[in-house]
Amino acid sequence: MAFAHDLAVEQECRLRVVHVDELIPGHGGVHHAQALEPEIQARIKEQVSELIADGLDAEYELHQVATRSPAHAIAEVASAVGADLIIVGNVGDGPLRGLLPGGVAHRLLQIARCPVLVVPKTLEPRKNERVSLRIVDFTVGDSERR
């Protein structure tokens, strides 16, 4: 969230924080894929409230999916709102989990219609220190941006 915060401040842009709750069909109905789903949702809502308190234009959006990947839901929202960038945390348990076929970050890299920035789980900004961001312009002469 720190990268998204700092990028939004630097670029004076809007943040739409999308959380996808994966539902798994089973006996007695559907169940959350994450046992701590209510706590996860509460934490994300709290983070968005902090973004808003910092003066950012931020919005929380929850999607529940049972039959398709969370990556597809995120990509659809990004496409619908005309997002310029998707920022996703790589929250896999191991060093390669987020890049394995089927991982949300890996799938977004394949299907998103805009750039995807994957922020590693191990990267934590130091307290009270802003994350250093560099916006790279790949414009060559008068040609369009790549």
Image (tube, rainbow, N blue to C red):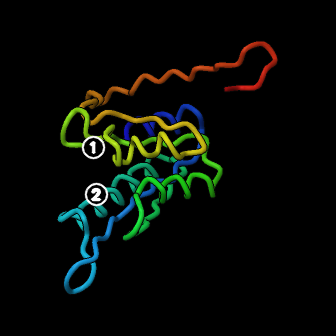
In front here: 141 or 45?
141
Side of 52 relative to 27 (left or right): right
Side of 74 relative to 137 (left or right): left
For badge 1, the amino acid type reads Val
- In the displayed orientation, state which residue is furthest to the bottom: 28
Side of 107 relative to 78 (left or right): left
Q: Residue at 35% across / 48% down in the picture? A: 102
Mark 2 Cα within 10 Å, few/some/many (few <14, many 20+)? few
- In the displayed orientation, state which residue is furthest to the top: 141
Percent of width and height locating residue 94: 19, 37
SS for dot 1: loop
**Mark 1 and mark 2: Cα distance apart in space:** 15 Å
Tag 1 near tag 2, CB within 8 Å: no
Residue 72 vs 8, above or below: the answer is below
Q: Residue at 70% across / 19% down in the picture? A: 139
Earlier residue among tags 1 and 2: 2
Residue that carries the numbered disc 2 in the rendered image: 43
Quadrant placement of the C terminus: top right
Total numbered badges shown on the rendered structure: 2
Q: Name the image quarter holding residue 2.
A: top left
Residue that carries the numbered disc 1 in the rendered image: 91
Q: Residue at 52% across / 49% down in the picture? A: 15
SS for dot 2: helix
Q: Residue 4 carries which label?
A: none
For badge 2, the amino acid type reads Arg
Percent of width and height locating residue 13: 59, 42
In front here: 45 or 73?
73
Percent of width and height locating residue 66: 37, 70
Nearer the observer: mark 1 or 2; the answer is: 1
Q: Name the image quarter holding residue 95.
A: top left
Q: Residue at 21% across / 86% down in the picture? A: 28
